[in-house]
Amino acid sequence: QVQLVESGGGLVQAGGSLRLSCAASGLTFSTYDMTWFRQAPGKEREFVGRITWSGVNIYSDSVKGRFTISRDYAKNTVYLQLNSLKPEDTAVYYCAARPRDRINYDYWGQGTQVTVSS
């Protein structure tokens, strides 16, 4: 079956960096758009950014210039590099996969916690 497994979260000081990974299995990775979302306590889930099946990136304004999404087709893995972290970046980060010609997300990971201390 399809699995998305995130890793790499943790506790970091403001201004620091982390790299999150999302390893995908059970799907044809090269035909899926991969998206990162986050959800902070008491807040709605928020779009962070996406890398399309062909490698095109889109980012939310709140992370543009600080976060970078990349993908490794050989490893079926998508990465989220988080730089210049702020306390307001504290959230559970989720990756999600959708087929390249669809709108809805078929698969979600379990999430990884990122906590940024001030």
Image (spheres, rainbow, N blue to C red):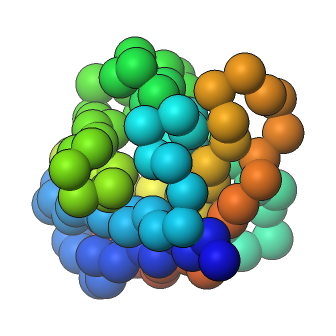
Expressed as whole percent of the image width and height from the top left, the position of residue 102 reads 79, 28
Q: Nearer the viewer, residue 15 or 103?
A: 103
Expressed as whole percent of the image width and height from the top left, the position of residue 108 reads 67, 64
The answer, for residue 79, to whether it is visible in the render is: yes
With respect to residue 36, does 112 lie above or below? below
Please tell me which residue is depicted at 28% across the width and 76% down the height of the picture.
Answer: 8
Q: For the C terminus, give its image quadrant.
A: bottom left
Expressed as whole percent of the image width and height from the top left, the position of residue 95 reads 55, 58
Q: Nearer the viewer, residue 80 or 11?
A: 80
The answer, for residue 39, to whether it is visible in the render is: no
Q: For the N terminus, give its image quadrant.
A: bottom right
Q: Is residue 35 left or right of residue 79?
A: right
Please tell me which residue is depicted at 40% across the width and 20% down the height of the picture.
Answer: 54
Residue that lies at the very extreme toward the left in this rendered image = 16
With respect to residue 73, does 102 lie above or below? above
- Quadrant of the image occupied by residue 107: bottom right
- Quadrant of the image occupied by residue 3: bottom right
